[in-house]
Amino acid sequence: MQFAWDHHQIKLPDSPDAKALSEFLRQEREADPENFPILSLAVLKLLGRGQYVAEIPGDQTPGHFGLAVDAYTHSTAPNRRFPDLITQRLIKAALARNAVAYSRDELVALAAHCTEQEDNAKKVERAVRKSAAALLLERRIGTLFDSIVTGASQKGTWVRIWHPAVEGKLETGDDRYDVGERVRVRLVHTDVERGFIDFKPT
């Protein structure tokens, strides 16, 4: 994927390096705060989804790439998420010097299950947001918007408009656009049921 931020001439290491990425984002936030949210969104898309991993003593685990730390856990309230309940049970057992509440195989299976269920929940959330955005725009077919390219791959090109702040697919034809490129677009189609929003460049 190419970026329209190439003029900054900032080079990241070829291999994944969380600290280098963190420093790059810090510099970009300071240098261009207006456009930083778009860059941040593009980086999140490139990183892909996170997943729960059971960290077993003695095993090598990837840690949290985004935070650039090797050891990481997250817990809020056990009535909110099942992973939080698991974490609190493990902490309580450790503090009481009791046996771990789960076996190694159970923790690995639970981590995979929690990842799958969170992915399912996010799919529903995304679908609802897309349908709501399509409903919001369905009476504005033909309207012109300023947009910025947030995704460009073989699957298609996506842009985000600002008022309202929603994302849709760009019908590019033979044209190619880079992430970060600004494009004037016209809204040409919405489908509330499927959550589709389609734009054409002007």
Image: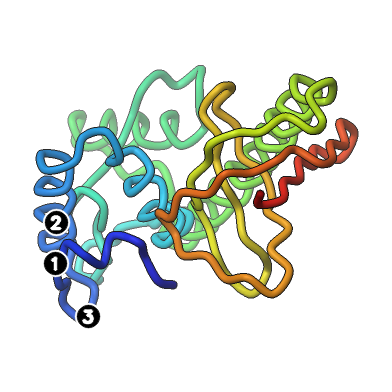
Q: Residue at x 80, y 37 (%)?
A: 195
Dot 2: few (<14), some (14–19), or many (≥20) neighbours within 10 Å?
some
Cα gap from disc 2 to disc 3, whole angstroms: 15 Å
Would you identify the image quadrant in which residue 2 lies? bottom left
Dot 3: few (<14), some (14–19), or many (≥20) neighbours within 10 Å?
few
Q: State which quarter of the image contains the N terminus.
A: bottom left
Of label 3 and label 1, which has the lower sequence position? 1
Q: Residue at label 2?
A: 24
The outermost residue toward the front is 202
Q: Residue at label 3?
A: 15
The coloring applied to the image is rainbow
Amino acid at pointer 2: Phe
Vertical placement of 186 versus 57: above or below? Answer: above
Horizontal relation, residue 43 to residue 81: left or right? left
Q: Residue at x 55, y 40 (%)?
A: 160
Would you identify the image quadrant in which residue 123 lies? top right
Q: Residue at label 1?
A: 10
Vertical placement of 118 versus 104: above or below? Answer: above
Amino acid at pointer 3: Ser
Amino acid at pointer 1: Ile
Q: Residue at x 24, y 58 (%)?
A: 63
The outermost residue toward the bottom is 14
Asked if the residue under mark 1 is in contact with the one under mark 2, i.e. CB atoms within 8 Å, the reply is: yes
Asked if the residue under mark 1 is in contact with the one under mark 3, i.e. CB atoms within 8 Å, the reply is: no
Cα gap from disc 3 to disc 1, whole angstroms: 15 Å
Horizontal relation, residue 119 to residue 19: left or right? right
Q: Secondary structure at mark 3?
A: loop
Q: Nearer the viewer, mark 3 or mark 1?
A: 1
Of label 2 and label 3, which has the lower sequence position? 3
